[in-house]
Image: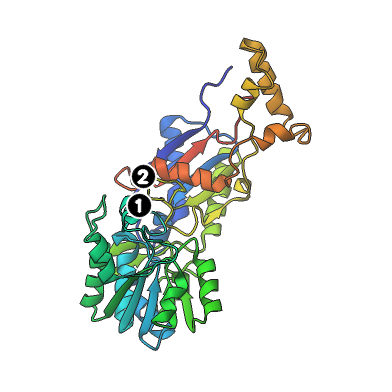
Amino acid sequence: MTRFFGTVSRGVRAPIIREGDNIVDIVVDSVWQAHESENTPFRDKDVICVTEAVVARAQGNYATVDEIAEDVRQKFPSGEIGLIFPILSRNRFSVNLRGIARGVKKIHLLLSYPSDEVGNQLISEHDLEDVKLNPWQDLLTLEQYREYFGQNLHPFTGVDYIDLYQSIAREEGCEMDVYLANDPTTILKYVKDVLTCDIHSRHRTKTLLEEAGAETLYNLEDILSEPIGDSGHNPQYGLLGSNKSTEESVKLFPRDCQAVVEEISRRLSEKSGKKIEAMIYGDGAFRDPVGKIWELADPVVSPAFTAGLEGVPHEIKLKYLADNDFADLKGQALDDAIKEAIRIKDENVKAQAEVLRLGTTPRRITDLLGSLADLTSGSGDKGTPIIWIQGYFDDLTD
């Protein structure tokens, strides 16, 4: 019988998860109840995706502003630091900033422009062109920025993030000077102790600063990479991937995730008799075309996944085959020819090299699945922190 559905992504409802809950039990039970209630059969290579937020919540992986401050205080005993390239976000950075400001006496804040790393704008490209600034070379003081551009409110939140970040520092009794530049070594004109806050460019930024003579140098991944007292922590990512929980606490990116996905996979595979894959996902890897904001503010899309999700897709473009190799075919003959090309793509890679070269963009499977899961679950009130994806590894011949 012909199948008319290909890939299907379903949000699975689950109880509200609290610290101390057994996340594996909840995921397995929720998926199984959905299977029975909706009469949805399992298939080999089904993928169960679990949002990182509920994993971290079950782990109790939280930290307070005071714990952030204490770690910063220990790492920067001078009490005066350069803080460079944070993203402009109340959810992602404001509480972290409060902890940092509580731990030092003075911050030299260096912001990238015209936008931060994920696309939040401080200056529109049009305004930047009007004043003939070169963002790769020119340093702006806060006074120059205000003279040129005035107050800039974020188009989605209506917040002036420079004002917000300065107000947080003031509330913590911390002095703050603000500059705008894209060369990270600019900060060394003012201070030699630096905390970098960029996410995906962090390794290059640290290398440039080391070579330029920074003395004490850390990234957010180094803050709370170990616990402060009984605090949460993440040995790989520290504060990267953290989110605001309350005004005085953050939820960290989950840790020890591999054991979670392996156990979910094992138990659902045993119960269903099918090979079930599992992964934990955070932000998807996509960009909003209107706001120009890149969604991925986490250090990775997926911090853990089972072995069957390794690699990149091995696909060919059907439109290329239809328009070139089989341009003279139509109807059933065209359908049969394309299916045969799909069947032999793995058997005769050399012969199919040209077709495969024009295949899909070589993104990692986990980045694609995580993006699909993030779009399916949303970040609001859907109540579906678990995503059940079927048919992702199928092709037209299945």
Residue 155: % across, % down? 26, 50
Q: Is residue 154 above or below residue 99?
A: above
Residue 27: % across, % down? 45, 48
398 or 202, nearer to the observer: 202
The quarter of the rendered structure image containing the C terminus is: top right
> Residue visible at 35% across and 86% down?
79
Query: SS of the residue at dot 1?
Result: helix
User: Which residue in the protein does label 1 denote?
Assistant: 125
| Cα–Cα span, label 2 and label 1 | 30 Å
First in sequence, mark 2 or 1: give its number: 1
184 or 136, nearer to the observer: 136
Under mark 2, the amino acid is Gly
217 or 224, nearer to the observer: 217
Query: SS of the residue at dot 2?
Result: loop
Q: Quadrant location of residue 84? A: bottom left
> Is residue 387 toward the left or the right of residue 314 in the image?
left
> Is residue 8 toward the left or the right of residue 246 in the image?
right
State whether residue 231 appears in this view.
Answer: no
> Residue visible at 38% across and 74% down?
83
> Residue visible at 39% across and 58% down?
21
> In the displayed image of the protein, which residue is found farthest to the bottom?
78
State whether residue 184 appears in this view.
Answer: yes
User: Which residue in the protein does label 2 denote?
Assistant: 378
105 or 395, nearer to the observer: 105
